[in-house]
Image: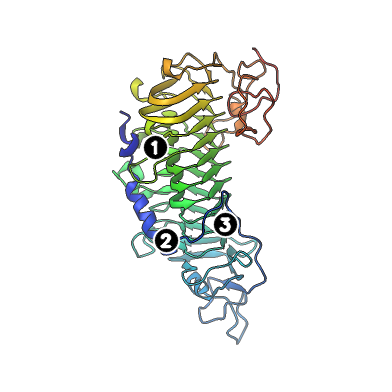
Amino acid sequence: MIGRVTGRSYPVLLLLALCAAVAAAGAVRAAAPPAPTLAPAAAAGRVFFVATDGNDAHDGLAPARAKGARRGPFRTLGRAARAVRAGDTVQVRGGTYVGYAGSWGYEQGGTEAAPITIMAYPGESVVIDGDGRRLPDGPYTPLMQVYGDWFRVRDLEFRNGSYAGLNIAGSHCLVENVVSHHNLGSGIFASGRHTVIDRCRAFSNSLKNERGVMPIGWGFGISLCAGARSSVVRRSAAWHNWGEGLSIASGYDCVIEDCVSYDNFTTNIYISQSVRGVCRRNLSYYTPGNPIQAFVSSQNCIFLGDEGKPPNSSGNTVVNNLCLGGDRGFLGSGEVLDGALIAHNTFADAFARLKRSESACVYFTAGRSSGARFVNNVIVQDGRVPVAHLEAAGVRFDHNAWSRRPVRGCRGAGDVVRDPMLARSGPSGPGALTAAWFELLPGSAAIDAAIPLASVADDHHGRPRSEKPDLGGIEAADRSSAR
């Protein structure tokens, strides 16, 4: 038993229902190809402007008011949302805009050839603010909602919302360089198809659960949820959220890649009710004594666990991730690992703050799966914390590097049982840890010790793996081996 994070007792079910309700008006329509499609460069269209000193009676077609004319910027984003058509761009002048920032695409969206862009005016900073988390007025209303397809949202900041920052319910949308923080609910969440969330940051969200007061229903930093399909979160960061940092929470063919997530409530990266999801090349870590630790039963770098609602997880891939600290580097519910591949990850140094039976560097709870494989990983654990805990059945273990001998069921052919010699170099504090900490030192027994996997041809940095690949997330720069 592992407290509130055990399998289906994990309390995000209410939030998923809320995500689905918010997304209902933006029901998806097209069949999903295997990869998301980015919104292309905008076709020639009108450019509208919004400014804090504008007027909704203006035509919105000039960045500043022309004396004695109706020509000038709108005052509210809601007015701009009603004006735009396919191919148009909205540039928001710098400043703080208090309250609801509009329902976009509710009646008309963009097209593949002519997407709609909502962005900050070049060189200026735009903040959408919920006025001390009092606004918007409606229940479960984000500061901005995008219902239509083929939208691009860029260079905006959302903060202090009474629910969430930004919701994307449409399909073929791009969210780029958006910051969302200090909202009562989630930071950014998407439920459509082919959404790309790129270079975004979410921190200090889900404040309704601050100090761990909610039994159920807390939010996320950034999430692909409520039936999202073929969508991606990439090159983004989540930290200090009082819910999960990054998540796939009811999704098909979704991806979390090249992200950083640290010091979030129960889990930095959460994969739940996910079919063919991919978690790759991420950096996930907890710092000792982080500001959330005292208020939560456990913290996990990566967690695969369902919550008793469809779809049942299957075919998920967790590769080339680097994890440090937390009460468990990897937590997997034994009943949701059907067809899972957990390969070429590096897990290091879980904390020693829980009972021995509740913590381990890698921890598999009870349940049976088929076709799951745990292979080519590096697992390093110091002190009294077990290197592995296994209750699950149906997981194949082979070709892993263990800093000390794991429990019998985790042992397999090709294992290396000795210190894999990680560099452990550079700072490891909040926002400071880099992949350099996880590099293999010359002479490591993990060098050349992996079995080649066609599906994992590159390492954490995207560098091709050698014909005799290394264990763990990173191919060694110095190929000398102690073997």
Query: In this rendering, does residue 350 appear at all?
Result: no
CA distance separating discs 3 and 1: 28 Å
- Name the quadrant of the N terminus: top left
Q: Does residue 271 appear left or right of residue 433 in this picture?
A: left
What percent of the width, then of the height, locates residue 62? 62, 76
- Name the quadrant of the C terminus: top right
Q: Earlier in the sequence, mark 2 or mark 3?
A: 2
Nearer the observer, disc 3 or disc 1? 1
Q: Secondary structure at mark 1?
A: loop
What percent of the width, then of the height, locates residue 396? 47, 24
Mark number displayed over residue 174 = 3
Q: Dot 2, how many residues are within 10 Å of its Cα: few (below 14), some (14-19), or many (20+)? A: many
152 vs 154, nearest the viewer: 152
Give the residue displayed 53% in from the left and 44% down from the top.
255
CA distance separating discs 2 and 1: 33 Å
Mark number displayed over residue 130 = 2
Contact flag, marks 2 and 3 (Cβ < 8 Å)? no
- The three-letter amino acid code for the residue at tag 1 is Gly
Q: Earlier in the sequence, mark 2 or mark 1?
A: 2
- The correct choice, above or below, for 77 with respect to 449 in the image is below
Q: Secondary structure at mark 2?
A: loop
Nearer the observer, disc 2 or disc 1? 1
Mark number displayed over residue 305 = 1
CA distance separating discs 2 and 3: 23 Å
- The three-letter amino acid code for the residue at tag 2 is Gly
